[in-house]
Image (cartoon, coloured by chain):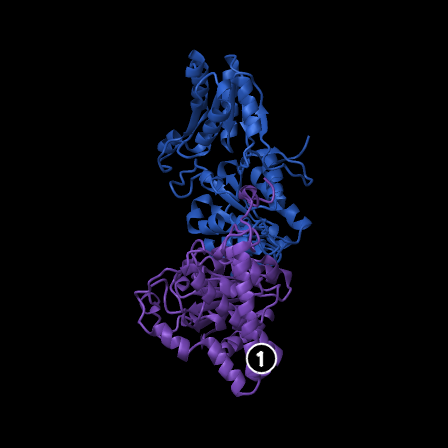
Chain colours: A blue, B purple
Amino acid sequence: MARKIMFKDAINEAMRLEMERDESVFLIGLDVAGGAGTATLDKERDSWGGVLGVSKGLYPLFPDRVIDAPISESAYIGAAVGASACGMRAIGELMFSDFMGVCFDQLYNQAAKFRYMFGGTAVTPVTIRTMIGAGFSAAAQHSQSPYSMFAHVPGLKCIIPSNPYDAKGLLAASIQDDDPCVFFEHKALYTMKGEVPEEHYVIPLGKANVVREGNDVTIVALGRMVQFAEKAAKKLAKDGIECTIIDPRTISPMDWDAIYSSVEKTGRLVVVDESYDVCGVASDVVGHVTQDVFGALKAAPQMVTAPFVPTPFAANLEAAYLPDPAKIEAAVRKTIQAKCAATVA
Amino acid sequence: MKTQLSKEDLLKAYRKMREIREFEDRLHKEFATGTVPGFVHLYSGEEAVATGVCEHLNDLDRIASTHRGHGHCIAKGVDIMGMMAEIYGKKTGTCGGKGGSMHIADLDKGMLGANGIVGAGPPLIAGAALASKLRKDGSVGVVFFGDGASNQGTNFESMNMAVTLDLPMIFVLENNGYAESTSPNYSAKVGTGNIADRARGFGMPAVTVDGNDFFAVYEAAGEAIERARKGGGPTYIECKTMRYFGHFEGDAQTYRPKNEVKEARVNDCPLNRFVAAVTSEGLVDAAELEAIDKDVLALVEKSVQEAKAAPQPDLADLMTGVYVSY
C-alpha cells in the first residue's frame, strides 16, 4: 500500500519535485518562508513556511527560489505573471482567494489576455495557488470559493483538487502547464490523509474523475463537496438508489464529455458546489446539460449550493450555509421523485 | 555626454525619434479621415524619453508600456510595418490584428506590451526584473508610465517591492502634464513639484530630468541601467515632457491653454533640440539628418499603404491563440 500523507504535504511535495526538476520554477508569496528580516530565518530553516505551513521546508532547499513578498498582492502576483512571461515558471501564492480583489487585474486583464492580445505569441506559465472554503468561522472575507469568477475569464485554467492524490498530480500538471493556472485549495482538506505515491506524476488538466458509479443519478461535486457527495451516495445506496459521482477536478477546462455521457446513462443530475448558484459552476453545468443533452433528462436537474449570502461567522449560521450530505441526499431524492416536463409531455 | 555617443549612435537615436514623430503625426492625420479603427493615443512630443532610455537596452532587457505605447515599441525595435498593420486591425499586424494600438507587443524584442490598464506595467516589470535576478543574466526591466499611473497602487507597491527584493528595475515616469485632462498639480501634489521625490521615500535613487532633452534622459537612464545591471537595485526617473495631441484621438482638449502645443513645437521640440545640439557641435551634418527624414517619411508612407491594403484576419482566427492547450 502506498504511503498516506496529508493534502497539504502533497502540495508541498509537488512544489518540491517541480523545483528540483526545473530551475525556472520559483515560489513567491506572503510568509512562504516566513520571518524575513528577523533572526528566525536563516539558510538552514524557515520560520513559518506559509501561514498554514504548506511550504514548510522548501526555503532551506531553494533559498533563492522561495521568496517572501511584502503584503502587496498586486505587485507580487503581477510579478509572478511578468516573470512567467519572461521564461520563468512562477508559483504565486495568494493566501486566501478572498484577496483576489486587490490583485485581480494582473490575472484578469494581464495573464489571461497576453496570448490572445499578442496574436498567440505569449506563453505565461504562471500558477496561482490560493485557499478557498468555509467551515472555520472565518467569516465573509476568509471563507469564499470564488472560482467561477476566474473560470469566467478566457485564458485562465481553474483547478480544484478534492483529495491528496489529486492535489499532488494536478499541481504538478499546473506548474508544468504553459497557460496561466489558478489552483484552489480547500482549507478543510489540508489535513485530509490519502495515498500518495512518492514519485513524480501528473494528472492531466481537463480530465474528470469518476469517483463512484451508479445508474440512477449523476452527482457532479467539486473540491470538499466530493466527500459530502460520497456520504450521501452511501446512504442512498442502502435504499437502492445508485449514484455516479463525478469530480471534474478542473472547471476550466471542464470535462463535458464525462458529465454528458453519465447524464445520458442516468437521466438525472445533481450539482454540488460550495459556491453560489448565481452565475456559478452549478448553474453552468445545469445550463450546459439542459442545452446539450436535454433529451436524456428524466427529471429537472438540481443544484445544491450555498445560499446567495456572504459567509456568516456564527457556527450555526455557517453550518446552515454550507451544503452537506443531508442536503445532497434530499436533492437526489427529488430527482428520483420528480418527472421532467418533457417526459410527461 | 553628447560626445560619448558615436556618430552612428547619434544617427540611430535620431532615426528612432523621427520614426516615432512621423508615425504618430501620420496616424493623427489618418485618424481624422475615419480610416483608423478603435482608440488611439499618440506619443508625439515625448520621443526623447522612449529613445533616450531604450538606446541603452538590448533584446534581453524587458520594457512594459502604456496605452500611449507606439513610441516605446518603435524605440525598442518593433517593426514599423507590423505596427501600422496592427493598428489597422490587419492579419499582417504584429499581433495578427487581435491586439490593436493598445496591445502591441513583441516578446522577442523584449517588449512586453502596450497596456490598456493604467498602472498595470510596474508589477509585470518587477516580475521581469525578478526573472533577470534569478537568472543572473545582467538584464534589466524598464517600466514606462505616466503621471496618471504614478498614483496607482500598483506603482507604489512595485516601488516598495523593487527595493525589498533589490530588483534590476527602472521606473520611467513620463510626466506629460495631463492625466487624461487632470493636471498633476492637482492629482500628484508633491511639495517639490517633482513626483520623483516620492521614490526617495521608498529608498531608491530618483532624479527628475528635462524629458525633451534626449541627452539628459540618455544620461540619467544610462546611470540607472548600469547600476541595475551591476546589482545596485532600482531607480526612478521622472521625465518632464509634453504630448502634442489629446489624451486620445478625437479629444477636443478643452483643458489646455490655446497655444501650449504650438509654442512647444517651436521652442521645446525634442527633435529640434537634438538637431540643434548635434549640428552646432558639428557632430553630425544636417544633410545626414535630412536624409533620415526622407527615409522615414517613405517608410511610414509605405507602412500606411500596406496596412490599408492588407487582408483582415481570417474568421477562424477568432478562436485561436487563447491557450497554449485547452
The quadrant in which residue A301 appears is top left
* Residue hosting label 1: B288
**Does residue A152 appear in this view?**
yes
Tell me the SS state at disc 1: helix
Tell me if B257 is positioned left or right of A272 in this view: left
Check the image and report above or below for A120 versus A254.
below
Residue at image point 54% right, 87% down: B281
How many marks are shown on the rendered structure? 1
Residue at image point 51% right, 40% down: A184
Residue at image point 51% right, 65% down: B72
Tell me if B108 is positioned left or right of B219 in this view: right
Quarter of the image for the C terminus of chain B: give it.
top right
From the top left corner, tell me how far across and down residue A272 is, in percent. Answer: 47, 28
From the top left corner, tell me how far across and down residue A102 is, in percent. Answer: 42, 51
> Residue A304 or A345: which is nearer the viewer?
A345
Check the image and report above or below for A75 versus B234.
above
Q: Residue furthest bottom?
A: B281
> Residue A224 or B27: which is nearer the viewer?
B27
Check the image and report above or below for B272 versus A260.
below
Residue at image point 52% right, 29% down: A226
> Residue A75 or A252: which is nearer the viewer?
A252
* Mark 1 crowd level (few <14, some 14–19, many ≥20, 10 Å Cα): few
Quarter of the image for the N terminus of chain B: give it.
bottom right
From the top left corner, tell me how far across and down residue A223 is, in percent. Answer: 51, 33
Query: Mark 1 is on which residue type?
Result: Glu
Q: Chain of mark 1?
A: B
Check the image and report above or below for B229 versus A30.
below
From the top left corner, tell me how far across and down residue A169 is, in percent. Answer: 62, 38
**Does residue B233 appear in this view?**
no
